[in-house]
Image: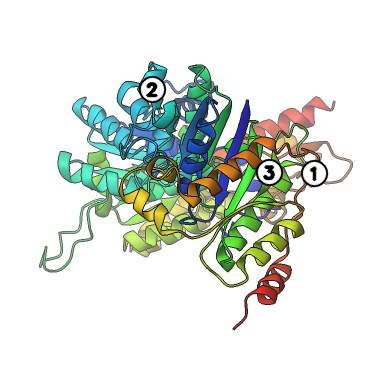
Amino acid sequence: MNSKNSHKNISRLEGCTVIGALTVTSFVTDAATIVHGPAGCAHQSASMIQSAMLYNECYDIPEIFTSDMSEEEIIFGGEERLKETIRETVTDGRYRAIFVIGTCISDTIGDDIETVCKNASAEYNIPIIPIDASGFLGGSFEKGFISAIRGVTELIPPRRTEADAPEAPAEPEHKTVNIIAEKNLEYEVDENFAEIKRLLSLLGADVNTRIARRTTVADIARFNNAALNIIRDDPTGAISAHIKSVSDIPVIGAFPTGLSGTIEFLKDAGRLMNLDEAVIDAAVSSELKNQEEMLKRFADLKGKKVSFDLFGFQKSDSAFLDEIAERAGLKIDVDGPAIMIPFYTPIGTAGVKQMLVQWRRFINGRR
Amino acid sequence: MKQIALYGKGGIGKSTTSANLSAALSEKNLSIMQIGCDPKHDSTRMLMGGRWIPTVLDTIRDKGEEINADEIVFAGYNNIRCVEAGGPEPGVGCAGRGIIATFQLLEKLDALYGDVIVYDVLGDVVCGGFAMPMREGYAREVYLVTSGDFMALYAANNISKAIARLSNRSRNFCSLGGVICNSQNIEGELELVSEFAQKINSQLIGFIPRSQIVRVAEVNKKTVLEYAPESEQAGIYRTIADRIMQNSPDVSKKPTPLTMDELEELAQKHIKA
């Protein structure tokens, strides 16, 4: 039982590995995902994803299939059934890649999904990528999510070597950036992306490809064109470590939070992309001005009292809340109305603005 | 209906013993059914004149579950009804689940009947699936087949642990019927296996001496009872069959498996240079 996490690890309570994996793979729009297990594994996951997406007003229909294992496959092994399902999916003709997600039962009986995928990939000449997601081995939503990020990055072409391209490609006019591991079920996913895109535009840079958010297989093939990789967030460091192992492109490990955090992000991103200091300085001063303008809109909050309800979470991250309060002229006081902080910290200056709107509601609600 | 299961270490002679006991029981004008619960599906071959009958799981795989009893139950020597559960190819799937599916299908087809049903179960109790015959009230009496060989006793002791564990369940139907010694001509074997049976709170049901006639019958694709009905060996199987028919073990009597140290001590006491 070596692979099982301790009971203290609450991440195990976060749900099924298969769902975590599907929130990534089903956002590669021209790929199909086969869940290799009983039909219920796919049904349960697909319904949860779709209801979460509808709640977020996101009307994409995930391309999810099941190998529909039954008792016969459990007894005799499910590899033949999986081969058949892959064949049916490939024959459909719409898909440029297929992901195969294993389940608890397929791993219990030891189906060799990797070999089935490898052989089918050679036979049909499209990428067929296995993703490990057997939750009983100690997985959770998070583990499936990371496994799927690994799986999707297999679509990145191998790094160019000098033998392939003796001359370095010409520097593109505009630098581009890959956005990695966005949380597709997060309510603010599009707002957060828009904010990152806005910040990058201050540096004259644009987005190259997203791993994975309404991304095509061809988009992923362009991965190596980027000058920078930015990860949504990566508390365990597992995603950064993986991205560094498949790409030489420099990495920023998280989207920026807070006012000074956003400024630091601009500086880091500019330097990692080797931009001229003048370009970076211009971006920074433009954003500082933007932040001042934004804070002016909350002048009515000056001198009011607030306290933060951290629920015991994110203690180490709370410094950015103090900073926002201070810059907005609020007084942190235990007698002030308790402001519940959002589960996911808001991204960039736009996130701070949205948070201040909420704070205002809390503060004025006390009147 | 008496339902018995033979468990024991792989290669100890469970199938040979089962087939000969079934043959001996069939002479008593009883309706006998023998179910081989081993993916190797070689339990009933001697009863079928050397024929490898189609296994239940192969038949399910070929035809689905809409099958008739006569496609999986075959009449062998003295009309003994023979079934082989079968299993997946070695190294894939889950054979334990296959055993469960076989029993469920036999029940659905009303094929589980007779005066005596003999379950011949592979090797050790490897997982929940292979404990199925004793778990869900199919086999009511378990007979451990062993020799004086230490590893055979070790396996038998492990199976007695499984029975002891099952007897703690609220609905337990299974008890340890006794120990059958299938001799390997080891010095002190009878005493060793007798004492082992006693120590695990059971009894020695029979001692089958090693005999060339068993091999000869086997290569002639017959049980000893069919090939040499007048032989001494045939008489021994008949005696054990009688004892099993007279035996009605108490379900509340739990086996007392030995610790490893106790088992080693016991073997050292009887097996000496």
* Type of amino acid under label 1: Lys
Q: Name the residue under label 2.
A: A61
Report the chain holding disc 3: B
Residue B163 percent location from the top left of the image:
69, 46
| Distance Cα–Cα, label 1 vs label 3 | 10 Å
Q: Earlier in the sequence, mark 1 or mark 3?
A: 3
Instruction: Pick the residue in front: A62 or A230.
Output: A62
Quarter of the image holding residue B117? top right
Q: Name above or below for residue A43 compared with residue A242.
A: above
Q: Evaluate whether label 2 is on the same chain as label 3.
A: no
| Distance Cα–Cα, label 2 vs label 1 | 61 Å
Disc 2 crowd, CA 10 A, few/some/many (<14, 14-19, 20+):
some
Q: Name the residue under label 3.
A: B177
SS at circle 1 = loop
Which is more foreground, mark 1 or mark 3? 3
**Residue in view at x 28 percent, y 44 percent:** A116
**Do callouts 1 and 3 mark residues in contact (Cβ within 8 Å)?**
no
**Which label is found at residue B253?**
1
Which is more foreground, mark 2 or mark 1? 1
